[in-house]
Structure formats: C-alpha cells, structure tokens
Image (cartoon, coloured by chain):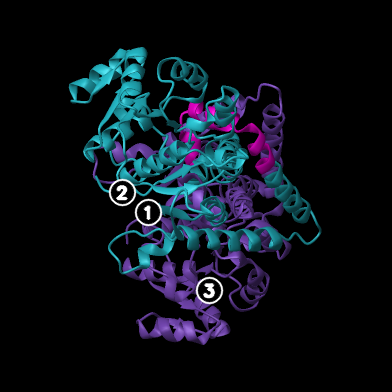
Chain colours: A purple, B cyan
C-alpha cells in the first residue's frame, strides 16, 4: 500500500446515484468496499452485478466496526439523524463522512450527538438529474469537485487527535481515488458558496421558465438559446431541487437578497428617461469572464488533448505545523489540494 | 421563377453579422442581391470575396430604386432614423424591411415618416455573440425564427394595397429562402415576447454572474453546470446586450416586474419557519417541460436524422379573405407560416 491509498475499507450507507457510483468507482480501483441500502430491490440489483451489499443496517454496521471501515453516509438529508443514532449504537468507533449537498445542518446534527471527533464532512458536486442505483456509474466523480470540511480542527481548543487527522486523510484519498478534485472548505463557507453558484441558479431558472411560459405560445415559440440555457436546470426533478434549496435556506436567502438588490437597481435604471443597464451589464460581463478564466472554459482552445482544471493546487502534509492555516488559505483561493 | 421565389432583387444596407450573412445566404441561393456598408473596409473584404457591394449609400439607393429592389435595413437601431430619411429621398418607391431585434420603436419611426405602406418589419432571431462582416456566414439563419410583422394591415381602415401584400410575401419568401422559419407577430406582441424569452434571460444571467463572483474564489471554484449555463449569455458583448435590452425597456420592465414578484414570493416562503419553495419549483418545472415540448428539445430521442421543429404550421394565401385573422391566429399559437 502506498501513502496515497486509503488505509481502511469503505462502507457506503445508501446506494442511490451518489452512493452507488461511489461503490462502483471504489471497486473499479480495487478499494475494499461494501454497501447497505434499505430497499432490498437495489441491493438485489447490486448483488446481481457482483457488489458486496446488504439491506441489513445493523449487520452492516457491526461489520464496519469489526474492520474499522470508513463509513460514508450517502442518504438524503432527512435520513441522516437516524443514521447517526445507528452509528452511535452499532459502530461506535468508526470514522465517517457524508455526501449531503448542505454541510452546516449535517455538522449541527453531528455536534449535537458529540460525534465530531470522528466526522469529516464531504460534498461531491456531481450530477443530480437522475437518481437511484440504476442511474449510478463509476465515472460520476471524474474531474468533479469534492468538498472536504475541516471545522473540527478550529472548533476545539486542543490539538485534534491523530485519529481525526488519519480520518481526514482517508476521506481526501477516497475522493481522489474516484477521480475528484478535493477542495477544502468550512461548512458555512461551503453553504454560502453553493447558495450563490448552485442554489440561486436553480431559483432564477424556475422564475425565468415561469415568466417565459406566462407569455404563452408565441413566447415559447420565439425562445431560443438564452432561454434554453437559462432555464435548463428548471427541468431537474422538483423534489431534488427543493431538498437542496430548502435545506440551505439561510445562505440562499442571503444570495437571493443580493440578487434582488441588483435586479431592483437595474429596474430603477431601466425606468429612467434615458434607460441604461450599463452598470449591471458591464459588471456581469466582467464577472462571467473571471468565471471562464477560473473554470478553464476556454481550455477547448488548448492544444492539450486532456481537459485541465485552472484551479490552483496546494500540496500539504496533514498534521504538520500550520496545516490548518494552509487549508484556510486553500479555501480562500478555491484551490484544490493534494496530500503528501 | 416559381411562386415561392422572391420577385425582386434584394438590397442589403449594413453588412454586419446579420446583413452580411443575409447577403451570403441569398447569393448561395442565386437570389440577385447587392449590399452597402458605410465602412469601406467591410466592402473591400466583401468585394474581394466576389460580392456586389458599395460604400456609397446614395448610389446604392438609386440602383435599388431603378430595379425596384427589396431594401433590407440591416444596421443597428441608432442608424435607422437617418437611413429612413435617405430611403425617402433616394429610393422613394422601394418596399423595405429591417432586422432590428425590437419592432415597436422601428415601426414608430416608420409611421412618423408616413412610410408604413411600404414597410414590413422583420426580426431574424440568430446569434449575436460575434459581429461584423468577418463573423457572417451563409447558414446563420437555417432553422432560426424570422418574425415578420403585419400591423399595417390592422392600422388602416381601408384594405391594404396590393403592393404592400406583394412586399409582405417577398419578405416571407426572403426569410424562407435563407432557411428560416417565419412566425408572424404584431410589433407589441413581438416586443413583449422577446422581453420574456430573450432580454430577461440576459438580465438574470448578468445578476447571477455578479452574485457568484461576489462569493470570491471559493464560489467560482465550486461553480459547475447550473452556474455555467445560467450565466452563459453574460459573456455576450455588453454593447450588444445593452442595445437589445435598453431599446425594449418598456416591455422588459413588465417582464422584470413579473420575475421580481415571483422571486419576492419565493423569498417570503423561504424565510418562513418551515421554508418551502414548492410553488416556485413545481411551476417552474412544469413551465420548462412545456418549453421542451414546444421546442422539440427531446427530438434527440427521435429516430429521425433531421432535427424537427415542433411548431405548428399555418399555410395561408396572402390577400385572400380572412388572411389577417389567420395571421393573428398563427401569432397566438406561435405557429410558423408557409405562403402559397
């Protein structure tokens, strides 16, 4: 085993799109991994494909406790509280992570149960259009961002335990093993950022779709590229969009208020005798250009055959002096990290 | 010449993206066509490619008057007033159309000069990301919508002249000849529709780009598909976006107010003790699905190798009894028309 490999088996609880894809991706990379799903139909399907899965939670947790597995909570938010209780009872010494798209609320549940010394939060930012084991596939995380949190290191006055550092490293290695780029962030910084760049886009897409539709058949008939792209994510399953946005309501309110303020300014300028949208449009253009530069959207013009991320890279040694400050720096820069 | 061919030469004034592409497309279909551009550099480039072009407006208009050409005003909105004066002086009997993206303001200028009996408005809804002769290409209009207006037929108490009907038919034939789908609409209905489905998407994209950017490097680093698509048109040249949106300020204000009302309702529901976005998200989803059905976005699943438009088709005989009512029906349905 090299230093870049995860040091323990992985136990995935929940085999939907994310959990299922994780189990598939780990098996492809020969990482020992097994899974649990409440519905027997998914475990039957996964078993038939040769995966090591069960629909007996207690049994699965005892097994994880016996081989000191890294447990991944891969269920939707509403199931997390009950799962934590089960972990506390049946796998009291395992380290664990999760894949929920909002991190503050999960962290609050973890802290309320005093389980924060064995928890590292995670958020793989990968597709949500389809769901369930049947929709899962092993390359889902390739080149995706996987946010890994580190609040626990700042929330205690004492140095964090070696066990927690090892857990943190294994979560990073797991994400890296399945092809993701790891970006460190604290839970509130994460939630504020995804409110801006993931949840607000959904809100605006829904509103735009409705205003276009209210214009009747002529409007829909004249709609072209700008409307198609601007409303694309309004085609996502409403239950998934609601779960994301409503769970992150506090941060989303802030982002929405900022957006409303810009739109009201624009409205006021548009209603003047000489209507001008100069401020909104010039600033919006500059912002989009910065995003394109960051995301490497122009990499299509590169001569390299492989797509490259334009994110800066931080290499760091977890547990070494100052490593938490390095994580905060990486968070500020939106940098991806590599662990050595 | 068959009945489906345009009955006169075409004179294109302005050889930017739209005018240049029109001249190229007409020549490819062997429709006699020539052009004017104020800047000699564009006419030199076009001449070198074998196009019949001039940078002498007066000369070009005298030629159009001599061969009864259909004149196409293919300049930006600010140049339209002066061009109308020139037409009045040097080509006083030619019929003309335009390609400006807002129709009410052009129609007002035309009516103010008493030129409405020889005017039919047009709006080819095709790309705006690049501009100038060098960006033009002959297939720009293939499968694009080309709106053709018909207000003059409703604004007079008397029957419209045969000359105007012939002009209207030739504008439709020209658009069809270059591969576009013709949708009839009155100027205010057009302007209201494009405010909803073309100008509002730009406003929202600009605001979203700014809110994402305000989140700093972490936000831009976490931004993925929903942000990329939701801000795409914020990358368009600010001067073009401003010209579109500011010229259509009245209709855009209405669309923006409708959007703000939806967003404020959503904000209120999000701030409740049990945050719920059910109304916005369910309605937005249904609206997007209706748009997808209309635009044939799922045609990718079709076994047909050709992309098909899902717009209804109206076949009509211009000048026949009731043809204007048929146009109004087609407008209500967002139907494309074929002329026989």
Q: Does B60 sit above or below residue B9? A: above
Q: In terms of secondary structure, where does tag 1 sit?
A: loop
**Cα separation between marks 1 and 3:** 65 Å
Alpha carbons under labels 3 and 2: distance apart: 69 Å
- Which of the two residues, A87 or B212, is positioned nearer the viewer here? B212
Looking at the rendered structure, whether the residues under marks 1 and 2 are on a common chain is answered as yes
Pointer 3 local density, CA inside 10 Å: few below 14, some 14–19, many at least 20: many
Could you tell me residue A274's position as x and y percent? 66, 21
Q: Are marks 1 and 2 in contact (CB under 8 Å)?
A: yes
Q: Is most of the magenta stretch helix, strand or loop?
A: helix
Q: CA distance from mark 1 to mark 2?
A: 7 Å
Label 3 close to label 2 by CB (< 8 Å): no
Locate the N terminus of chain A by quadrant: bottom left
Q: Residue at x 59, y 53 (%)?
A: A209
At a point 41% along the width and 16% down the height, the residue shown is B90
Residue displayed at 21% across by 21% down: B47
Residue extending farthest right: B273
Disc with the residue nearer the chain's start (1 vs 2)? 2
* Residue that mark 1 sits on: B340
* Residue position for label 2: B3
* Circles 1 and 3 on the same subunit: no
Q: Position of residue A34 (x, y in %)?
A: 44, 76
Specify the subunit that label 3 lies on. Answer: A
């Amino acid at each position: 085993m090299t230093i870049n490999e995860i040091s323990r088996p992985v136990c995935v609880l929940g085999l939907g799109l994310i959990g299922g894809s994780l189990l598939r991706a780990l098996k492809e990379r020969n990482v020992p991994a097994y899974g649990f799903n409440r519905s027997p139909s998914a475990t039957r399907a996964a078993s038939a494909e040769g995966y090591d899965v069960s629909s007996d939670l207690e049994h699965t947790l005892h097994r994880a406790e016996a081989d000191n597995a890294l447990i991944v909570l891969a269920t939707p938010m509403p199931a997390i509280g009950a799962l934590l209780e089960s972990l506390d009872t049946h796998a009291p010494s395992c380290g664990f992570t999760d894949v929920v798209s909002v991190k503050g609320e999960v962290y609050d549940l973890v802290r309320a149960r005093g389980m924060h010394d064995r928890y590292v939060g995670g958020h793989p930012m990968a597709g949500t259009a389809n769901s369930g084991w049947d929709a899962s596939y092993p390359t889902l995380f390739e080149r995706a961002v996987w946010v890994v949190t580190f609040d626990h290191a700042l929330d205690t006055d004492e140095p964090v335990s070696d066990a927690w550092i090892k857990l943190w490293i294994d979560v990073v290695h797991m994400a890296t093993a399945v092809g993701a780029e790891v970006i460190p962030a604290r839970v509130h910084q994460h939630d504020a950022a995804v409110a801006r760049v993931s949840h607000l886009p959904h809100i605006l897409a829904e509103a735009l779709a409705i205003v276009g539709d209210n214009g009747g058949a002529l409007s829909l008939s004249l709609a072209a590229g700008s409307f198609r792209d601007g409303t694309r994510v309004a085609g996502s399953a409403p239950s998934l969009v609601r779960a994301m946005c409503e769970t992150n309501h506090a941060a989303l309110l802030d982002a929405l208020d900022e957006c409303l303020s810009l739109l009201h300014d624009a409205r006021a300028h548009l209603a003047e005798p000489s209507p001008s949208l100069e401020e909104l449009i010039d600033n919006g253009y500059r912002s989009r250009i910065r995003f394109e530069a960051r995301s490497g959207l122009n990499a299509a013009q590169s001569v390299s055959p492989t797509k490259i991320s334009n994110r800066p890279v931080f290499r760091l040694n977890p547990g070494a002096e100052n490593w938490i400050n390095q994580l905060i720096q990486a968070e500020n820069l939106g940098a991806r990290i590599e662990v050595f």
